[in-house]
Structure formats: C-alpha cells, structure tokens
Amino acid sequence: MRRMSRRAKILSVSSGAGFSLIELLIVVSIIGIIAAIAVPNFIESKAAAGDAAAKADLKSVMRALDQYLIVFGSYPASEAELSRVGFTSTANVTFSTFNLDTDDGVQSVHMHVQHSASSNKWHARYPKEGREIQPR
C-alpha cells in the first residue's frame, strides 16, 4: 500500500463524509430566517409581560390604598409610604406620577406606571375613576 503525502491527504476528497459548502449555507440561511421571525415575537412578548406586571402593580396599589386609608385615615402622599402597609412594587416597574389630589371634596390618588421592558404607560385615578386602568 502506498503512503499518501500530507498534501495529498489534505486535497483528497473523502467519500461521503461531512457536508458540502452548499448544504452548510442552506442550513445557516434557514437558521437566519427562523431567527428573523422569532426575535420580534420575543420582543413583543417581553413588552406584553411588562405591561401585565405594570397593570398588576396598579391593582395592588389600589388594594394597598384601601388598607392605608383604613389604618391611617387618609391616602398617602407618595408611593413610598405604601410600604407601611406592606406594598412593594415589582422589579422594573416605576411610578412616574403619584399625586394625591382632591376633586369635589373627594380625595383621589393619580398614578402612572411603566415597566422598563415596555414603552407603554398605564394610568389610574383611584377611587375617583374606580379600578379602571387606562393606557396613557
């Protein structure tokens, strides 16, 4: 049996072992197409989850406001005071507005919240507008 030189071994084509360049390019392009479809869907899902967390925090704040009113006799002046009745906001949810105001002799708390994964802001004025949460 004749020994092949190193160069001949490199240049020799093995019979059916491995993938051709065309096959690899096709696989890579299919993976790219799948990624192009999946990434926007993932981003939308992340934003929707952030919106759900922000709205859930607004609902929790409304319950905490009821507790605060019962315990202290008035509504808090800031969201930080709600910790006195055990409220803590969800991670990445921030209040951009938390104002105590009086309209027609009725105290209400005006709130805007936003999650960092979403560009949407959510609004509530409790108890004046009830438990309704609206996009802002």
Image (cartoon, helix red, strand yellow):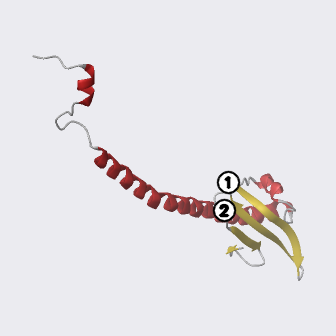
Residue 122 placement: quadrant: bottom right
Residue at image point 25% right, 30% down: 11
Residue at image point 28% right, 48% down: 23
Query: Mark 1 and 2 residues: CB-CB less than 8 Å, in contact?
Result: yes
State the mark number for residue 34: none
On screen, 86 above or below 1?
Answer: below
Left or right of 136, for residue 17: left
Mark 1, other Cα within 10 Å: few <14 / some 14–19 / many ≥20: few
Q: Of 45 and 106, which appears nearest the observer? A: 45
Residue placed farthest to the left in the image? 1
Residue 97: horizontal and vertical position, in percent? 81, 65
Residue at image point 65% right, 66% down: 55
Amino acid at the residue labelled 2? Ala
Residue 8: horizontal and vertical position, in percent? 23, 25
On screen, 55 above or below 3?
Answer: below
Among numbered discs 1 and 2, the one appearing first in the sequence? 2
Mark 2, other Cα within 10 Å: few <14 / some 14–19 / many ≥20: many
On screen, 25 above or below 127?
Answer: above
State the mark number for residue 54: 2
